Amino acid sequence: MTKIGLIYSRVRFEEKLLIEALNKRGIDHELIDDREIIFNLTHNGYEGRGNVVQPEHFRQFDVVLDRAMEFTRGLYALEILNSWGIKTVNRAEVVATCGDKLLTTAMLSRHNVPSPVTQIAFTPEAALEAIEQMGYPVVLKPVIGSWGRLISKVNDREAAEALLEHKSVLGHYLHEIFYLQEYIKKPGRDIRIIMLGDEIVSAIYRSSEHWVTNTARGASSAPCPVDSALEKIARAAARAVGGGFLAIDVIEHAERGYLINEINPTPEFRGSETATGADIPNRIIDYLIRIAKDRA
């Protein structure tokens, strides 16, 4: 019988569905609150008390699912667990890649997976030069971030100078990495694909009058038919970053076809399940059981 560990930050809609599905199927599981757990990295005879855990505690699990809401918190927990030989979904290296837009784009480019034109600069002066070469408008994104936060459409030089100066004085080193992407006029929507390994579990259109089409920003969801080209590029993108439980965001370009925009390694799936009726929680559980057996 498979035993599953579930690392979480807060029991959201998705975690409730996962817990309900685990309970209905009678699958042994344990909830691990990332706000309370303490990892003993050195495990040098110090037993600790309370929430301090040793590798042996996690070896009771056949696989651990990461549902941490904060990127670095989830990533470091996975790094620790993987270093202890614990099977996780996703693997730390996949989360490290997909949680960083620069690394994601680099891996997509390395594997020849089509994506929007992207340039990286390390100073405001170089970023301004890149923007002027690309031509307005340009999209300025943080290399780490989700839910469409801190994304800006830069329409002219004055806006570019103001935004670059603002980022440069924020103080965090990540704001000194300028991730610049071509602006693509979408047909009022993008596509979100939920994948488990090589399998497409659901595909939805996310539609909005705003140029940012995240459901967290109010976009509506509707089922998206998956043609052979969309299936091909989604699978290629998943393989490029190492595979797992992923949400792949796709832009439709009028001339160049499908382009991979971003990949989320800890996806929310409320909109996808509501729009398509796919039983995503049970599909995730099936995948976890398969990973536990495949990596045994």
Image: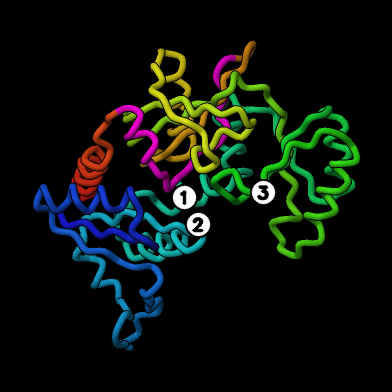
Marks 3 and 1, Cα distance to the nearest angstrom?
20 Å
User: Which of disc 2 and disc 3 is earlier in sequence?
Assistant: 2
Q: Quadrant of residue 160?
A: top right
Q: Quadrant of residue 37?
A: bottom left
Residue contact between numbered discs 1 and 2, judged by CB atoms under 8 Å? yes
**Pointer 2: what residue?**
71
Can see residue 113?
no
Crowding around mark 2 (Cα neighbors within 10 Å: few <14, some 14 to 19, many 20+) is some
**Measured along the vertical axis of the image, is residue 111 above or below residue 39?**
above
Helix, strand or loop at mark 2 = helix
Give the camera-side residue of 6 and 98. Answer: 6
Q: Identify the amino acid type marked 2.
A: Phe
Q: Is residue 57 above or below residue 71?
A: below
Of the image marks 1 and 2, the number of the one nearer the N terminus: 2
Which residue is identified by label 1?
A: 95
Start and end of the magenta stretch? 257-276
Instruction: Compare residues 110 and 40 and report the one nearer the observer.
Output: 40
